[in-house]
Amino acid sequence: MTTPTADTTVLLGWQSKLYYSTGGIGTSPTWVEVPEVQDVKLGLDKKMTDVTIRGLAGTQAEKGALKVTSIEFKVPYIRNNAHIAALVAAYFSNAALGFGVADGDIATSATTNSYQAECEISKIDWPQDHDKNQELTITAVPTLPSATAGVYNAPKWVPAGGA
């Protein structure tokens, strides 16, 4: 029996990538990298529900119910930039975009982990401070995804080597 070797590479934030797809996350999304992105935060949270029973002798017990996720990222405001224009247009049209938050090149599925979800952009902050460059802080949250052959494309974690 062979023991699998673990990849112990420490990754830095700049090595990760953010992608979007106007066609969602279905069978073969066409990912577009957002190379201008600065900081990305993938928020993974879980709503908990009370499952306490009397047999626990007064101890509260909880079980995970709904997963609550969000993707927040910053991009410098650049006029006439195609990526920024697509993201802002999606906000104003209430269009869903597929998003991929990956720890490397999303096309290299053998070595890259990613979170993928169809999202709506729920918030864009555009501060215009006197002494700073303009940047957008954009928040995207999962929305009702498109269906492929009657099956919804639910948010998913795609581990390295997975599909």
Image (cartoon, grey):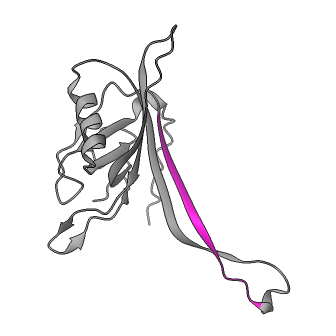
Is residue 106 visible to us here? no
Q: Quadrant of the N terminus?
A: bottom left
Q: Is residue 134 left or right of residue 119?
A: right
Query: Measured from the top left, where is residue 129 in percent x and y?
Result: 51, 15
Residue drawn at point x = 18 percent, y = 75 percent: 150
Q: How many marks?
A: 0
Query: Measured from the top left, where is residue 96 in percent x and y?
Result: 27, 51
Is residue 41 visible to us here? yes
Residue drawn at point x = 19 percent, y = 46 percent: 22
Residue 14 lies, with reference to residue 56, above or below; the image says above
Residue 132 lies, with reference to residue 153, above or below; the image says above
Q: Residue furthest front?
A: 92
Residue drawn at point x = 50 percent, y = 64 percent: 67
Q: Residue furthest top?
A: 131
**Helix, strand or loop for the magenta stretch, by majority:** strand
Query: Measured from the top left, where is residue 162 in percent x and y?
Result: 31, 58
Q: Quadrant of residue 139?
A: top left
Residue drawn at point x = 40 percent, y = 40 percent: 103
> Is residue 41 within the magenta segment?
yes
> Is residue 48 within the magenta segment?
yes
Q: Residue furthest right?
A: 57
Residue 10 lies, with reference to residue 2, above or below; the image says above
Q: Over which residues does the magenta segment extend?
A: 40-53
Q: Quadrant of residue 163?
A: bottom left
